[in-house]
Amino acid sequence: MASAIPVLLLLSGDLRLAVQASIVGCATLGAILIAGGQTLYASVAFVALLYLAPAALAVSVQRSGSLRWSFQIAVVGAMALVGALHVGLDNPTGSWEQFVGDWVHLIAVKLGPVGYKMDETAIKEMFAATNWGTFVGNWLTTVLSSLFLGCWWHSLLHAPGAFGREFQQLRLGKAFGSLALMIVIAAFAFDKLATREPILDALLWVAIISLAIQGLAAAHRLKASGRVGRGLLTATYVLLVMPVMNVFVLMLLAGWGVVDNWRRVA
């Protein structure tokens, strides 16, 4: 991930090179987006979300010395982004459905020539129910992946093994963990009552992904202590990139994240 390079440079204390790498990366990504048909404003927004956010979190890690604190900042930022989308857009649900429709149709057109057929209607309905949640959740995963990768590179150069120990200690904490759990419970309760709250549907995915990342950190800690084997951890990563199965694994990791958060708080 190109956005991990400024993270590495910032953590290494080379601000000049970090700024230069960020400028080149932002310009390249912006040009690709505009060439692909995105508007200038949308391109700037995407560049800020995908390229500048990891750099901002790297500054937080550098100043606080805590990867956990930066993880919590990213989660709060994702929830704030969901709120901004639902407040700032005149029709957030309609805008999301249009965005999903265009995206699914584009993929169907690309895959059609190779003989792969998609049920566009079913896929649209599945994603439409998330109301920007999957979009923001994927953004959160991408940003944190860039941050983690940059931190790992930095540890390989300066303190081998340090990143692994820090990553294993990730947790949402009592306040954010409680908030994430309440969002999950409320979303499922509204669903059982056949009442949909668009913003709650979106926050649900942010909460699940946040808890799943903590669950993954807990799995790494179990692996480091020898309580689980390398094969199980490898299988977890493989299943996370497999369609359909990744949702079930994500839910299991989120559940383990809840357990791990409260065990460690207690």
Image (tube, helix red, strand yellow):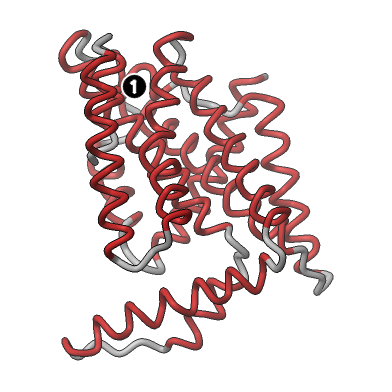
Residue at image location 46% in from the left, 17% down from the top: 60
Residue at image location 28% in from the left, 31% down from the top: 22
Q: In which image quadrant can residue 145 be found?
A: top left
| 105 lies left or right of 193 | left
| 99 lies left or right of 259 | left
Q: Quadrant of the C terminus?
A: top right
Residue 128 horizontal/vertical position (percent)? 58, 73
Residue 264 horizontal/vertical position (percent)? 59, 21
Residue at image location 32% in from the left, 60% down from the top: 34
Q: Quadrant of the N terminus?
A: top left
Residue at image location 66% in from the left, 33% down from the top: 177
| 189 lies left or right of 216 | right
Which residue occupies the foreground of this view, 188 or 260?
Answer: 188
- Secondary structure under the numbered disc 1 in the rendered image: helix
The number of numbered discs placed on residues in the rendered structure image is 1
> Does 252 sit above or below residue 97?
above
Which residue occupies the foreground of this view, 233 or 70?
Answer: 70
Residue 38 horizontal/vertical position (percent)? 39, 63
Residue 252 horizontal/vertical position (percent)? 50, 50
> Does 113 sit above or below residue 41?
below
Q: Amino acid at mark 1?
A: Ser
Check disc 1 and report the residue beneath it.
225
